Amino acid sequence: GQQVMQIPQYQHVQEGEDFTTYCNSSTTLSNIQWYKQRPGGHPVFLIQLVKSGEVKKQKRLTFQFGEAKKNSSLHITATQTTDVGTYFCAVITGGGNKLTFGTGTQLKVEL
Amino acid sequence: KAGVTQTPRYLIKTRGQQVTLSCSPISGHRSVSWYQQTPGQGLQFLFEYFSETQRNKGNFPGRFSGRQFSNSRSEMNVSTLELGDSALYLCASSGGWGTGELFFGEGSRLTVL
C-alpha cells in the first residue's frame, strides 16, 4: 500500500530557530495534507496541497509540494513554544477520506 | 458549531472483554473515519463510514468493527480485547466524500490489562 516516509523523527530547536520536516513517497501523490498534534491532543488539519510545485504560507509556516508530487515539506520560521507538537503528513489513499499518515516529526522548542 | 465528540475519553478493560466507542461528528458531516494511534505503529486507518455504509476498511482483524447510524453518529467495537489493542482511538469527520480535511475528536484512550 501507499507509504510516506517522514524525516526527521525528532527535532529539538531553540526558540527562534527554523524547523523543517519532510515527507517522501516513492510514487506520485495526488495530494498531501499536513496535521499538527499537540502533546496529549488530537491531530488538527493545517493544509492540503494538490498542485505540482505548490507553495502555501500560513504566517510562519510554509508548505511545499514537490514538482514531481513525490515529496512535500513544512517549514516553520522562527519557532515559538506554541509550535511544540508532532507534525504529520498524510495522503488520501483508496478513495474517500482514507488517509495514510507519515510517521510524524516531533518538534520540541526550548527557551 | 460543536466539534467531533468521542465517548468515553478513557477506559480500562481486561483481555478478552469487548469495548464500544462512540463518535458524534460535526453537524452535517456524513463521513466518519476511525483511526488507531499507538507509539509503535503511529496513526493507522481502521474504517470509514459514509451515509451508513462502510466505504473503506483498513488492515485490521475482524475483531474490529463499526457502524454508522442515520444521524451520522458512529460506533466502533473491538471484541476479544488483546493487550496490543491498547491505543488512542480517534474518530474524524468530514463534510463530504474525498474532500480532504478531517476534523478529529479528542479520542478515546483504551488501556487493556
Image (tube, rainbow, N blue to C red):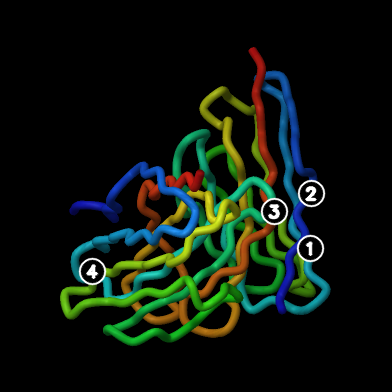
Residue under the image location 63 percent in, 73 percent down: A51
Q: Residue at x 52, y 74 (%)?
A: A98
Q: Position of residue A25 (x, y in %)?
A: 78, 69
Placement of A15 over or under B11, stated as above or below: above
- From the image, tell me which residue sits under label 4: B73
Q: Nearer the viewer, mark 3 or mark 2?
A: 3
Residue bearing mark 2: A7
Q: Residues within 10 Å of mark 3 (few under 14, many from 20)?
A: many
Whether labels 4 and 2 belong to a single chain: the reply is no
The chain containing the residue under callout 3 comes to A
- Residue A37 in the image, given as x and y percentages of width and height: 52, 43
In terms of sequence position, does the residue under pointer 3 or pointer 2 come before the other? 2
Residue ID for mark 3: A103
Secondary structure state at the residue bearing disc 2: strand
- Contact flag, marks 4 and 2 (Cβ < 8 Å): no
Give the label on residue A24, or none.
1
Residues at marks 1 and 2 touching, judged by CB atoms closer than 8 Å: yes
Q: CA distance from mark 1 to mark 4?
A: 35 Å
* Closer to us: A30 or B25: B25
Residue placed farthest to the right in the image? Answer: A26
